[in-house]
Amino acid sequence: MASIAERFWAKVNKNGPVPAHAPELGPCWVWMANALPTGYGLIKIGTSSKVASRIAWEMENGPIPMGKKALHKCDNPPCVRPSHLYLGTQLDNARDRDTRGRNGLSKLTISQVKSIRAMVRDGSSQRASAIIFGVSEATVSEIISGTTWRNI
């Protein structure tokens, strides 16, 4: 039977987008399996589902202390690359959201919208972009056509 680590990494695409706001991070490692509607990956361990980014952090760094979360430097919910993660509180997460231009309602940031447009312009399919960023193909289509995010 495969270990948790083997099962986990088999569900990851290590050729994800490079965050436009932090290209020095390198490409995201994108969770390609089951996910929450918010884009965060899920993996079943035992009888319960766990958030994939938490498991990635714990496999690399050990347990996450109570009251802390695995936050994303890349601001890409399906990303599980340990070097893109850091520990923080819900307040830290809200501050990051505000700093990076998320309004609390949209699943995407300005940098993610720019990345989607660049990926499609460079030949990626809208479906692939939708999977990588944890949104619907319709959302990607609206971004590409300028129906949404036209100010970006």
Image: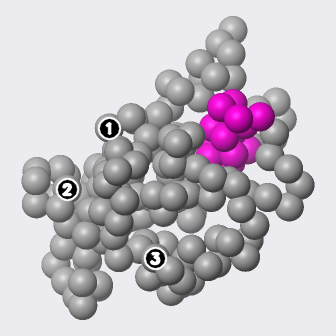
What amino acid is found at the position of numbered circle 3 in the picture?
Arg
Q: Which residue is mark 3?
A: 100
Q: Residue at x 42, y 64 (%)?
A: 135
Q: Depth check: give the residue in front, 32 or 103.
A: 103
Q: Is residue 106 visible?
A: no
Q: Which of disc 2 and disc 1 is earlier in sequence?
A: 1
Judged from this view, the residue extending furthest toward the front is 24
74 within the magenta span? no
Q: Which residues are magenta?
A: 50-62
What amino acid is found at the position of numbered circle 1 in the picture?
Asn
Provide the secondary structure element on which disc 3 rests.
loop
What amino acid is found at the position of numbered circle 2 in the picture?
Met
Q: Which residue is mark 1?
A: 15
Picture quarter containing residue 96? bottom right
Q: Which of disc 1 and disc 3 is earlier in sequence?
A: 1
Judged from this view, the residue extending furthest toward the top is 1
Cα gap from disc 3 to disc 1, whole angstroms:
23 Å
Q: Depth check: give the residue in front, 136 or 152.
A: 152
56 within the magenta span? yes
Q: Position of residue 43 (x, y in %)?
A: 66, 38
Residue 127's mark? Answer: none
Left or right, residue 60 beside residue 138: right
User: The C terminus is located in which quarter?
Assistant: bottom left
Q: Main secondary structure of the magenta part?
A: helix
Judged from this view, the residue extending furthest toward the left is 122
Q: Specify the color scheme.
A: one colour
